[in-house]
Amino acid sequence: MPRTIGTCLWFENEAEQAAEFYTSVFDDSRILNVSRFEGAPGPEAQAVAVEFELEGRAFTALNGARGALFTEAVSFVVDCEDQAAVDRYWAALTEGGSESQCGWLKDRFGVSWQVVPSVLGSLLAGPDPLGSQRAMQAMLGMRKLDIAELQKAYDG
């Protein structure tokens, strides 16, 4: 039985660049191993697999699939304590990528992320049902989530 569960991200040929990017965005992150195999598909010396950690979570970036695209069916959630963290992660992850709605984005590699303030759950499921509805409506109109605006909507 495995002791941990990791995530494998399958790229066409950007595995090493993606791992370098992600480890530069998140604190307490590092590349653990880069595997290069002679005779593997792609340019010589290109990484085939890159093992890395993001804040203690195990990931593998793998090169090997033409046309294998990421979809919103799988996304990574970044829990942010404050607006400064939301702003920081949003700016870093959207650079070269694209914004969506309700705190969702795609990074430059096509991977989907949700950049979410920790307080969101208490606003959307708070003791005031009308306040929660107002916060939900405010969120639905946002791209990057704004804690002050969400709180203002909740408070009415």
Image (cartoon, rainbow, N blue to C red):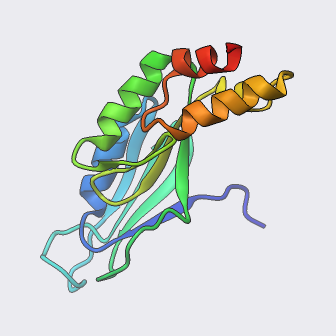
Task: Check the image and name the residue furthest to the left.
Answer: 44
What percent of the width, then of the height, locates residue 77?
Answer: 56, 44
Nearer the observer, 4 or 27: 27
- Residue 129 visible? The answer is yes
In this view, 74 is above or below 44: above
What percent of the width, then of the height, locates residue 67?
Answer: 31, 82
* Quadrant where the image shows the C terminus: top right
Instruction: Report the side of 136 relative to 64 (left or right).
Output: right
Task: Check the image and name the residue furthest to the right.
Answer: 127
Instruction: Report the side of 126 relative to 66 (left or right).
Output: right
Q: Quadrant of residue 89?
A: top left
Nearer the observer, 144 or 149: 149
What percent of the width, then of the height, locates residue 145?
Answer: 49, 30
* Quadrant where the image shows the N terminus: bottom right
Nearer the observer, 96 or 47: 96
Q: Which residue is found at the position 25% from the left and 63% from the top?
A: 14
Instruction: Report the side of 115 relative to 131 (left or right).
Output: left
Q: Which residue is found at the position 49% from the left and 23% from the top?
A: 146
- Residue 24 visible? The answer is no
What percent of the width, then of the height, locates residue 52?
Answer: 43, 50
Please give the count of numbered marks on the rendered protein: 0
Nearer the observer, 69 or 19: 69
In this view, 64 is above or below 147: below
Q: Which residue is found at the position 53% from the left and 49% from the top?
A: 76
Q: Which residue is found at the position 26% from the left and 66% from the top?
A: 47
